[in-house]
Amino acid sequence: LDKSLLDIRGNINAEIEKHLLEMVGFSVDTARNGVDAIQAFTVSKVGEYSAILMDIRMPFMDGLEATRTIRQIKKQDAGSVPIIAMSANAFAEDIEKSINSGMNAHLSKPIEPEILYRTLHELIRKQ
Protein backbone atom coordinates (compact mmCIF):
# COMPACT_ATOMS: atom_id res chain seq x y z
CA LEU A 1 0.00 0.00 0.00
CA ASP A 2 1.51 3.30 -1.08
CA LYS A 3 1.36 6.27 1.22
CA SER A 4 1.44 9.88 0.16
CA LEU A 5 1.70 13.12 2.06
CA LEU A 6 -0.92 15.42 0.66
CA ASP A 7 0.18 18.92 1.54
CA ILE A 8 -2.76 21.17 0.92
CA ARG A 9 -4.71 23.57 3.03
CA GLY A 10 -7.62 21.48 4.29
CA ASN A 11 -10.12 22.84 1.78
CA ILE A 12 -12.70 21.07 -0.35
CA ASN A 13 -10.13 20.42 -3.09
CA ALA A 14 -7.93 18.66 -0.56
CA GLU A 15 -10.81 16.43 0.49
CA ILE A 16 -11.57 15.53 -3.13
CA GLU A 17 -7.91 14.79 -3.87
CA LYS A 18 -7.60 12.70 -0.72
CA HIS A 19 -10.67 10.72 -1.73
CA LEU A 20 -9.29 10.20 -5.26
CA LEU A 21 -6.06 8.81 -3.83
CA GLU A 22 -7.79 6.57 -1.30
CA MET A 23 -10.03 5.16 -4.05
CA VAL A 24 -6.96 3.68 -5.74
CA GLY A 25 -5.37 2.34 -2.55
CA PHE A 26 -3.23 5.15 -1.21
CA SER A 27 -3.06 5.86 2.49
CA VAL A 28 -3.02 9.65 2.79
CA ASP A 29 -1.66 11.96 5.48
CA THR A 30 -2.42 15.66 5.23
CA ALA A 31 -0.55 18.75 6.34
CA ARG A 32 -2.05 22.22 6.70
CA ASN A 33 1.00 24.10 5.46
CA GLY A 34 4.61 23.75 4.36
CA VAL A 35 5.97 23.79 7.90
CA ASP A 36 3.69 20.90 8.89
CA ALA A 37 4.68 18.98 5.75
CA ILE A 38 8.37 19.33 6.58
CA GLN A 39 7.76 18.15 10.12
CA ALA A 40 5.69 15.14 8.97
CA PHE A 41 8.36 14.11 6.48
CA THR A 42 11.21 14.67 8.95
CA VAL A 43 9.73 12.37 11.61
CA SER A 44 8.57 9.70 9.14
CA LYS A 45 10.43 6.45 8.65
CA VAL A 46 12.67 6.25 5.58
CA GLY A 47 10.47 5.20 2.67
CA GLU A 48 7.23 5.75 4.58
CA TYR A 49 5.99 8.21 1.96
CA SER A 50 5.82 7.09 -1.65
CA ALA A 51 5.18 10.66 -2.81
CA ILE A 52 4.44 14.17 -1.61
CA LEU A 53 1.77 16.26 -3.31
CA MET A 54 2.76 19.84 -2.60
CA ASP A 55 0.46 22.81 -2.97
CA ILE A 56 2.46 25.81 -4.15
CA ARG A 57 0.44 28.46 -2.28
CA MET A 58 0.21 27.80 1.44
CA PRO A 59 0.35 29.91 4.58
CA PHE A 60 3.57 30.25 6.63
CA MET A 61 5.75 28.63 3.96
CA ASP A 62 4.96 28.09 0.31
CA GLY A 63 5.40 24.76 -1.45
CA LEU A 64 8.56 25.83 -3.25
CA GLU A 65 10.38 26.66 -0.01
CA ALA A 66 9.00 23.55 1.70
CA THR A 67 10.32 21.41 -1.16
CA ARG A 68 13.78 23.02 -1.04
CA THR A 69 13.84 22.35 2.71
CA ILE A 70 12.77 18.71 2.36
CA ARG A 71 15.46 18.12 -0.27
CA GLN A 72 18.10 19.35 2.22
CA ILE A 73 17.01 17.17 5.14
CA LYS A 74 19.71 14.70 6.16
CA LYS A 75 17.61 11.61 5.53
CA GLN A 76 18.12 8.78 3.07
CA ASP A 77 14.94 9.41 1.05
CA ALA A 78 14.91 13.24 1.17
CA GLY A 79 16.48 13.51 -2.25
CA SER A 80 14.50 10.75 -3.90
CA VAL A 81 10.90 10.93 -2.66
CA PRO A 82 8.81 12.22 -5.57
CA ILE A 83 7.38 15.67 -4.89
CA ILE A 84 4.61 16.83 -7.19
CA ALA A 85 3.54 20.47 -7.42
CA MET A 86 -0.17 21.17 -7.38
CA SER A 87 -1.03 24.66 -8.53
CA ALA A 88 -3.66 26.69 -10.30
CA ASN A 89 -0.77 28.33 -12.15
CA ALA A 90 0.28 26.36 -15.22
CA PHE A 91 2.46 28.82 -17.11
CA ALA A 92 5.92 27.68 -18.25
CA GLU A 93 7.62 29.89 -15.66
CA ASP A 94 5.50 28.33 -12.86
CA ILE A 95 6.46 24.83 -13.96
CA GLU A 96 10.11 25.89 -14.16
CA LYS A 97 9.99 27.29 -10.60
CA SER A 98 8.54 24.00 -9.35
CA ILE A 99 11.21 21.89 -11.05
CA ASN A 100 13.99 24.25 -9.94
CA SER A 101 12.85 23.96 -6.32
CA GLY A 102 13.38 20.18 -6.45
CA MET A 103 9.96 18.94 -7.49
CA ASN A 104 9.62 16.07 -9.93
CA ALA A 105 6.42 17.18 -11.67
CA HIS A 106 3.87 20.00 -11.80
CA LEU A 107 0.13 19.36 -12.05
CA SER A 108 -2.36 22.14 -12.63
CA LYS A 109 -5.62 22.47 -10.74
CA PRO A 110 -8.27 21.38 -10.97
CA ILE A 111 -6.52 18.04 -10.82
CA GLU A 112 -7.54 15.51 -13.44
CA PRO A 113 -7.63 12.08 -11.74
CA GLU A 114 -6.10 10.13 -14.63
CA ILE A 115 -3.17 12.54 -14.92
CA LEU A 116 -2.63 12.40 -11.16
CA TYR A 117 -2.67 8.58 -11.15
CA ARG A 118 -0.37 8.32 -14.16
CA THR A 119 2.10 10.84 -12.71
CA LEU A 120 2.21 9.06 -9.34
CA HIS A 121 2.62 5.66 -10.99
CA GLU A 122 5.50 6.85 -13.17
CA LEU A 123 7.35 8.63 -10.37
CA ILE A 124 6.88 5.95 -7.73
CA ARG A 125 7.97 3.23 -10.16
CA LYS A 126 11.25 5.11 -10.82
CA GLN A 127 12.29 5.02 -7.16
Image (cartoon, helix red, strand yellow):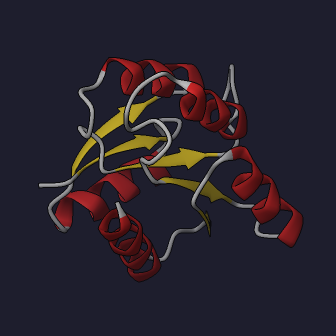
Residue 108 falls in image quadrant: bottom right
Q: Nearer the viewer, residue 15 or 55?
A: 55
Q: Position of residue 35 (x, y in %)?
A: 56, 19
Q: Position of residue 31 (x, y in %)?
A: 43, 30
Q: Is residue 125 left or right of 25 when viewed as pictured?
A: right
* Relative height, residue 48 to residue 14 (above, below): above
Q: Residue furthest left?
A: 1
**Residue located 23% across and 27% down the image:** 45
Q: Which quadrant holds the N terminus? A: bottom left
Q: Which quadrant holds the C terminus? A: bottom left
Q: Position of residue 26 (x, y in %)?
A: 20, 56
Q: Position of residue 49 (x, y in %)?
A: 30, 42
Q: Nearer the viewer, residue 73 or 19?
A: 73
**Residue located 62% across and 31% down the image:** 66
* Relative height, residue 60 to residue 91 (above, below): above
Residue 2 falls in image quadrant: bottom left
Q: Nearer the viewer, residue 16 or 66?
A: 66
Q: Nearer the viewer, residue 13 or 4?
A: 4
Q: Is residue 100 left or right of 58 when viewed as pictured?
A: right
Q: Is residue 91 left or right of 29 when viewed as pictured?
A: right
**Residue located 68% across and 19% down the image:** 60
